[in-house]
Image (spheres, rainbow, N blue to C red):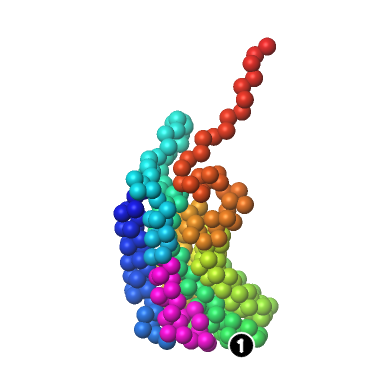
Amino acid sequence: MTRNRTYALTAVAAALYLALCAIFADGLFGGTWWDAQAIASSTVFTYLLLALIVGAGLLQARRLPAAGIPLGPAREPATPGQIDDPPAWKRLMGNTWFAIAWLPVRFFVGRAWLDAGEHKLRDDAWMQGGSALKGFWTSAVAVPEGPARPRIVAEYGWFRDTLQYMLDHEWYTWFAKAIAVGEVLIGIGLLVGALVGIAAFFGTLMNFNFQLAGTASTNPVLFGLGVFLVLAWKVAGWWGLDRWLLTRLGTPWARGQATTGHPVAPVRPPQVAAA
C-alpha cells in the first residue's frame, strides 16, 4: 500500500458515498442545512460524513512511509480440504489498510437507520401505544377480497400468523418502542463503528421482516449493503470504535496486526527434549 494508492482508494470511497446518496436517497445535498426536528436528515451531516471519509484517507496516507508497505499474502502451508479466498477479496474483507472503502457504506446505511429511528422516537404513534405499528401489521395481514392472492398468505402464511398473533395480544404497544430504539442503536453503531457486524446483522434482520410484511421502500438496498458490512465485520469498523472494541473482545487478529498492518509471527511452544 502506497500513499498514491491510498489517495486513489479515498477518491473511490468518496465517489461511492456521493453515488449512494444521490441514487438511493433524496434531499441529502439540497435539503435543510440543519433541522432540529430531523437531525439525522439535515444536509450538514451529508458533508460532514463526506469530510470524514476524505480526512481518514489523508490521515492514513500521512502515516504510510514514503516507500509504502507490502501487502503480499502470507504464505501458509496448504490445508487438506481448505479452499482459500482470492487475495483481493481477503484484503478487502480483512485488511485494515482497505477499511476506508467501507466508510461510505457504513455512513450511508447508518444514517438511513438513524433517520428512520429518530422519526419514530419523535412520533407518539410509535412511542405512545404503538398505533402506527398496529396499523402497519393490520395492513400486512389483510386478505384482499376477490381472486387476487394475498401478499403474505400466498407463500408465507406462517409469517402472517405470527403478525396476527402479535396483533391479537397487542404486542405493538411495546414492540413499536423496541423497533424505534433498535433502529437508532443500529444507526449509531454503524456511524461510530461500534460492533459493525452485529449492528449490520440486526439491520438486515429488520429489512428482511419489513420486506416480508410487504414494504419495499429502501429495504432492498439497505439489506444488500448490510450483508456486505456483515461480511466485512473485521475491518468495516476499523475507522471507528471497533479498532479498540474488537481487540478487547478477542478478534481473529492480534493487537500487533491491527495496529501496524504487518503480520505477527505466531508464538510456538518450547520444544521439550526427549529423555
Q: Residue at x 42, y 81 (%)?
A: 43
Residue 225 in view in this figure: no
Residue nearer the viewer, 262 or 103 = 262
Q: Residues within 10 Å of mark 1 (few under 14, many from 20)?
A: few
Residue nearer the viewer, 64 or 81 = 64
Q: Which residue is mark 1?
A: 124
Residue range corresponding to the magenta coloring: 33-53
Quadrant in the rendering for residue 42: bottom left
Residue nearer the viewer, 246 or 48 = 48
Task: List x then y, in percent, for residue 77.
Answer: 45, 30
Task: List x then y, in percent, for residue 32.
Answer: 42, 86
Q: Residue at x 32, y 62 (%)?
A: 11
Q: Main secondary structure of the magenta part?
A: helix
Q: Residue at x 51, y 49 (%)?
A: 259
Instruction: Please say whether residue 40 is one of the residues in the magenta stretch.
Output: yes
Name of the residue lying farthest toward the top: 275
Quadrant in the rendering for residue 99: bottom left
Q: Is residue 63 left or right of residue 247?
A: left
Residue 21 in view in this figure: yes
Task: List x then y, in percent, for residue 263.
Answer: 48, 40
Quadrant placement of the C terminus: top right
Amino acid at the residue labelled 1: Asp
Count all numbered tags in the image, as a single digit. Answer: 1
Q: Is residue 42 left or right of residue 23?
A: right
Q: Circle 1 sits in a helix, a strand or a loop, which is it?
A: helix
Quadrant in the rendering for residue 128: bottom right
Q: Is residue 81 left or right of residue 252?
A: left
Q: Residue at x 54, y 55 (%)?
A: 243
Instruction: Please say whether residue 42 is one of the residues in the magenta stretch.
Output: yes
